[in-house]
Image (cartoon, grey):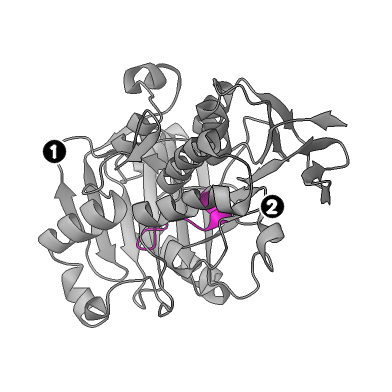
Amino acid sequence: MDYYDLIIVGAGPAGATLAHSLRDSGKRILVIDKKTFPRDKTCAGWVTPAVMASLDIDVSDYAREHTLQPIRRFRIGMMGQPAVENNHGDVVSYGIRRCEFDHYLLSRVTASRELGTPVKSITRKNGNWVVNDTWEAPLIVGAGGHFCPVAKLLGDGPGSHETVVAAKEVEFEMTPEQSEACEARGDTPELWFCKDLKGYAWVFRKGNFLNIGLGREDNHKLTEHLERFVEEMKASGRIPADLPGRFKGHAYLLYDHAERALVDDGVMLIGDSAGLAYTQSGEGIRPAIESALIAAQVIREAEDYSAQSLQTYGETIAQRFGNRAAETENGWHLPEWIKAPLASTLMRSHWFTRKVVTEKWFLHQEVPPLGLTGSAVHF
């Protein structure tokens, strides 16, 4: 049996950030992931300057060897009607490829790693957690996304009664012919809201790579909506007529709909395993990064790994992201006053699509980067 102070299940942005943040803590850490890296990850793939700042990533240095598409504009519309384009002037976000970004974050981790290793069992033994009958630690952190096995330790597990967003997307490198024909521009991601406001689709170009997808809370109609959207985009020339490969699916919880506890004795959940994706946009990278930084601070200061000692983590998450709604109406979590038919009019407004949809819901520009000073987390 190999003993550690902490086992992190999941080597994506949340898990890698937590391990990296604890690199000088003196704790013996093991990171486990069922995939080897670099690996494909279903995700539209953009990060805000706040994320890069929180991760202490030099943008110029990262861009030397990785895809980093500056974003200055957004095209936003409701399906079936013309889009509105807004120019933000400055760079407000960056397009990334998750296979590169996640591998970069993991490459900074100095802790022990077991990649290509599925978690087959998690058992309790003398106050510690034992994974796969091989590794033991008093604290285990779930960072493995929506279906993370650690999340099952804190309840019924994913899919029991929580409202789940399902998404399908494809990302591929365009041929010269496809690239020339594609009217989507790299610095201008496109967001298209479903008419029933239960989801949205996107077209996002990053150099010669193109990402197309659609996410909804009404997943039994997901494929139908996606096919209709793709045909619409092909007909308008926004995307190539000959898309390669299959659309891949993934699922996640939105913050206001998640009901999972975040801590218990010797257990913490971060990122998508905790259901932290932003309610209005579904973005999960920034909440994953920030939850990992908050968790690292709590772990450093905890007297022990009891639920009581770790509860500061849950309190700080609520302070940062707000208290979860007790009841939330189905739909893409828009305020009641935005419901159709008013939504159709608002989505044609430059002010609304820029100030509310883009800057508030998708970029969270009013929220400063998470800061860590000494032993305190400040916002």
**For the point 40% across and 21% down, which residue is it?**
62
In this view, the mark in front (2 or 1):
2
Pinpoint residue 76: horizontal percent, then vertical percent: 25, 58
Where is mark 2, residue-wise? 150
Task: Write down the region rendered in magenta.
Answer: 271-282
Give, as a three-letter code, the residue at label 2. Answer: Val
Name the residue type under label 1: Gly
Q: Does residue 202 lie above or below 194 as drawn?
A: above
Depth order, front residue of 297/116: 297
Residue 97 is situated, as x and y percent measured from the top left of the image, at 47, 35
Which residue does the numbered mark 1 point to in the structure image? 89
The x, y position of residue 75, in whole percent, is 24, 53
Q: Please name whichever residue, 332 or 366, is drawn nearer the observer in this view of the structure.
A: 366
Asked if residue 281 is among those painted magenta in the image, a careful observer would answer yes
Mark 1 or mark 2, which is nearer the start of the sequence? Answer: 1
Along the line of sight, the residue nearer the viewer: 25 or 255 = 25
